[in-house]
Image (spheres, grey):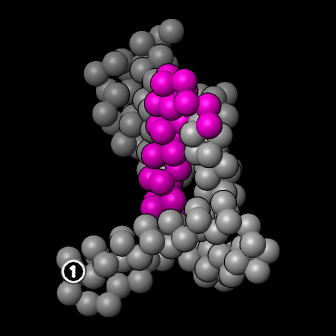
């Protein structure tokens, strides 16, 4: 079963269970996926359906928006909105691959640095290109960038 179909099935289940918070989030995800498909359709001029990788990219972008909103609301002291965003993020994260921890990312980055032959901070671009190709969806880009800088600077 495709990821998109799983979201649609879970949406029906949330309707039956009258789980309004989950249903609202799933409807938003469906809208974001449809929006991405329409954008691809108009660019390619043919009927276009996102595959699981495309759906994962949409979900990852939506999760990132939720994390940024949580951060902004926390700074603004809006605990009610922080809690709402956290609930949305939990629903979205159920469909994303498990996020790697900082130590796991650090170990993979060390292997990537050795693989591309990076020797210092000037090679950050090469390392990030290889790292994001390998870690896309499994790690936050900002965290990967920060850890790559630490490794390349020898910290």
Q: Residue at x 47, y 37 (%)?
A: 68
Residue 142: horizontal and vertical position, in percent? 44, 32
Q: Is residue 3 magenta?
A: no
Residue 81, compared with residue 155, is above or below; it is below
Q: Is residue 81 left or right of residue 127?
A: right
Residue 58, compared with residue 115, is above or below; it is below
Residue 128: quarter of image: top left
Q: Residue furthest top?
A: 155
Q: Residues within 10 Å of mark 1 (few under 14, many from 20)?
A: few
Residue pointed to by mark 1: 42
Q: Residue at x 50, y 22 (%)?
A: 75
In this view, the residue in front, 143 or 148, is 143
> What secondary structure predominates along the stretch shown in magenta?
helix
Residue 137: horizontal and vertical position, in percent? 53, 52
Q: Residue at x 79, y 74 (%)?
A: 17
Residue 11, compared with residue 149, is above or below; it is below
Q: Is residue 101 left or right of residue 70?
A: right
Q: Is residue 37 left or right of residue 81?
A: left
Residue 22, compared with residue 71, is above or below; it is below
Mark 1: secondary structure? helix
Q: Quadrant of the N terminus?
A: bottom right
In this view, the residue in front, 124 or 7, is 7
Residue 110 in sight in this render: no
Q: Residue at x 45, y 62 (%)?
A: 58
Residue 147: horizontal and vertical position, in percent? 50, 24
Q: Residue furthest bottom?
A: 47
Residue 111: quarter of image: top right
| Numbered range of the magenta stretch | 56-80
């Amino acid at each position: 079963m495709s990821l998109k179909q799983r979201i649609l099935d879970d949406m029906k289940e949330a309707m039956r269970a009258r789980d309004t918070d989950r249903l609202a989030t799933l409807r938003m995800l469906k809208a974001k996926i449809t929006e991405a498909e329409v954008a691809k359709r108009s660019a390619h001029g043919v009927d276009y359906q996102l595959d699981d990788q495309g759906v994962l990219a949409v979900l990852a972008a939506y999760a990132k928006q939720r994390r940024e909103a949580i951060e902004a609301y926390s700074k603004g002291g809006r605990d009610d909105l922080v809690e709402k965003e956290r609930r949305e993020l939990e629903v979205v994260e159920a469909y994303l691959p498990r996020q790697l921890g900082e130590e796991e990312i650090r170990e993979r980055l060390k292997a990537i640095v050795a693989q591309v032959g990076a020797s210092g901070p000037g090679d950050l671009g090469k390392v990030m290109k290889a790292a994001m190709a390998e870690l896309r969806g499994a790690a936050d880009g900002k965290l990967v960038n920060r850890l790559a800088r630490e490794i390349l600077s020898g910290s």
